[in-house]
Amino acid sequence: MAPSTPPLHEVNDRVLCYHGPLIYEAKVLKREFQTQDNIWEYFVHYAGWKSKWDEWVPADRVLAYNEANLAKKQEVSEAQKKTSGTP
């Protein structure tokens, strides 16, 4: 079955990606369309992390690398610090 929507990100794109409650900078290494779920998935490498952390993630965890999403990354990080009591 052909994808019903085009992919949002290309291979080698710089992106932001949710991993747990935080958002990290990442790079798209591969992408695949999952016909059974009708979704795009991306294999990402998190910047500054060993390749053992590379993983397949669904499109809803991947954000474009832009000013608005960088601000969102900062907000999420600050909110996490407040809830965890980290200075």
Image (cartoon, grey):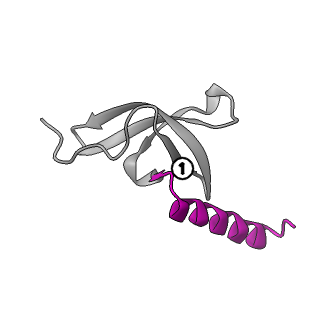
Q: Is residue 69 magenta?
A: yes
Highlighted range, magenta: 63-87
Is residue 31 shown left or right of residue 51? left
Image height check: is 57 above or below 23?
above
Of residues 73 and 39, which is closer to you in this image?
73
Q: Horizontal and vertical percent for residue 53?
A: 62, 33
The residue shown at (22%, 40%) is 36
The residue shown at (32%, 33%) is 32
Label 1 sits on residue:
16
Label 1 SS: strand
Q: Is the magenta stretch mostly helix, strand or loop?
A: helix
Q: Could you say which quadrant of the image residue 77 lies in?
A: bottom right
Image height check: is 81 above or below 62?
below
Residue found farthest to the front? 67
Q: Horizontal and vertical percent for residue 84?
A: 78, 67
**Quadrant where the C terminus lies?**
bottom right
Q: Could you say which quadrant of the image residue 47 lies in?
A: top right
Q: Could you say which quadrant of the image residue 54 lies in?
A: top right
The residue shown at (52%, 34%) is 55
Report the amino acid beneath label 1: Leu
Q: Horizontal and vertical percent for residue 63?
A: 46, 53
Is residue 82 shown left or right of residue 5? right
Image height check: is 20 above or below 40?
below
Q: Horizontal and vertical percent for residue 17?
A: 53, 49
